[in-house]
Image (cartoon, rainbow, N blue to C red):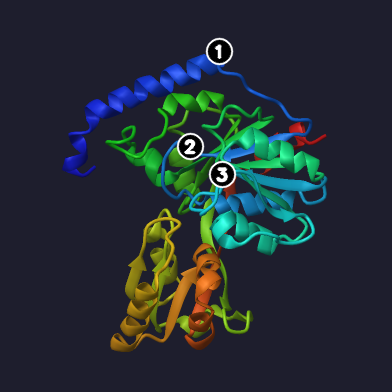
């Protein structure tokens, strides 16, 4: 932890008190939880920052594809709108990236028959999804949003954050203390380097239903033609990396592990909206550093394509698609889902 944040520890104590009281109010019924008429599966975390949750949501969408009309409901972080926005009605994307947010737009683009609704009031968003025909709801980033009842509560933590530990906000990045995991039905440990690390980390957690996942690059895709490019073409090439995600270090490490030479990484804040000056700076860096390709994430591509079509069509921009691969616990996750989706 940075020393400057140590001075915020008294604030973290007040934050802890507020979190404990809020959860207690839900537990005793002062704050009410509402139920909708379809199963709700929540995927959340107890820390701010990227834990690889979006690829996990995509994995669950694929798993649940044959179980009924599926919907994703989220707040839509980083969007420039408020209220209820139907990103996709299940027949195709119907909202702009600025109104929807980058991650909901990414999901709507990849899964055309998926109902996607964003709303800061998740109960209202879930009710809208049911009106549109949803039979199963995936509640994205919903662990702290207890106003909506969930039938399955999944929490994602990275192996690194479990090993290193953390303080509550604002001194650290924890939204809730580790004791809050008692509300979870399953724990997904993401970014496991290998099975040995999974066993080491899972042994530190006193709970059942632990799943281990490893983050890997799935494919590379040209923005100019949307064609998939073989990873071998980038080995040894000078790469300008561009990201506005929760954990840019993981993205850079994945590129390096694929044999790329990352000569510059423009790591913006999560859900960052790029400016004209940013794009010109990236282009200039590519020329000065003799960059062969500009590589970005799917989430960043959603924001870039909203305003910078010429940049994507004239520069050698590549989208790196990321996936989560099981290290352990696949049967456990399947069992948890089957218990809810009968």
For this view, does 117 lie left or right of residue 276?
A: right
Cβ atoms under marks 1 and 2 closer than 8 Å: no
Residue visible at 55% across and 32% down? Answer: 145
The local crowd at label 2, few if under 14, some if 14 to 19, many if 20 or more residues have their Cα within 10 Å, is many
The local crowd at label 1, few if under 14, some if 14 to 19, many if 20 or more residues have their Cα within 10 Å, is few
- Label 1, label 3: how many angstroms apart (C-alpha)? 24 Å
Residue visible at 42% across and 61% down? Answer: 244
SS category of the residue bearing label 2: helix
Whether residue 111 is visible to the viewer of this picture, yes or no, is yes
Residue at label 1? 30
Question: Residue 268: percent from the left, percent from the top?
Answer: 36, 62
Question: Residue 73: percent from the left, percent from the top?
Answer: 65, 44
Q: Nearer the viewer, mark 3 or mark 2?
A: 3
Which circle's residue, 1 or 2, is located before the other in the chain? 1
- Label 3, label 2: how many angstroms apart (C-alpha)? 30 Å
Question: Residue 249: percent from the left, percent from the top?
Answer: 37, 60
Quarter assignment of residue 222? bottom right
Q: Of 332 and 108, which appears nearest the observer?
A: 108
Residue visible at 34% across and 70% down? Answer: 265
Which circle's residue, 1 or 3, is located before the other in the chain? 1
Residue at label 2? 202
Residue at label 3? 75
Q: Is residue 104 above or below residue 263?
A: above
Cβ atoms under marks 1 and 3 closer than 8 Å: no
SS category of the residue bearing label 3: loop
């Amino acid at each position: 932890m940075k020393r400057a944040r140590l001075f915020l520890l008294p604030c973290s104590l007040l934050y802890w008190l507020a979190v404990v009281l809020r959860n207690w109010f839900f537990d005793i019924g002062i704050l009410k939880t509402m139920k909708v008429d379809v199963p709700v599966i929540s995927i959340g975390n107890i820390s701010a920052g990227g834990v690889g949750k979006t690829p996990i949501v995509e994995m669950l969408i694929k798993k649940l594809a044959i179980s009924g009309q599926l919907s994703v409901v989220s707040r839509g972080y980083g969007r420039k709108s408020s209220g209820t926005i139907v990103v996709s009605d299940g027949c195709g994307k119907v909202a702009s990236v600025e109104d929807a947010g980058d991650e909901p737009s990414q999901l709507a683009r990849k899964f055309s028959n998926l109902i996607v609704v964003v709303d800061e009031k998740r109960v209202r968003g879930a009710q809208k999804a049911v009106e549109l025909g949803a039979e199963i709801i995936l509640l994205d980033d919903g662990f702290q949003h207890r106003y909506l009842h969930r039938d399955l509560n999944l929490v994602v933590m990275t192996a690194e954050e479990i090993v290193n530990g953390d303080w509550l906000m604002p001194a650290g990045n924890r939204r809730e203390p580790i004791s809050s995991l008692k509300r979870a039905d399953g724990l997904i440990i993401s970014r496991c380097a290998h099975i040995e690390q999974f066993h080491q980390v899972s042994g530190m957690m006193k709970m059942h239903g632990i799943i281990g996942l490893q983050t890997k690059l799935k494919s590379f895709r040209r923005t100019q033609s949307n064609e998939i490019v073989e990873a071998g073409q980038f080995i040894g090439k000078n790469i300008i990396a561009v990201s506005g995600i929760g954990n840019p270090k993981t993205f850079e490490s994945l590129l390096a592990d694929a044999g790329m030479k990352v000569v510059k990484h423009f790591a913006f804040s999560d859900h960052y909206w790029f400016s004209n000056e940013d794009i010109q700076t990236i282009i200039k860096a590519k020329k000065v550093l003799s960059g062969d390709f500009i590589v970005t994430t799917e989430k960043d591509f959603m924001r870039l394509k909203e305003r910078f079509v010429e940049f994507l069509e004239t520069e050698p921009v590549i989208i790196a698609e990321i996936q989560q691969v099981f290290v352990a616990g696949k049967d456990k996750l399947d069992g948890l889902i089957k218990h809810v989706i009968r």
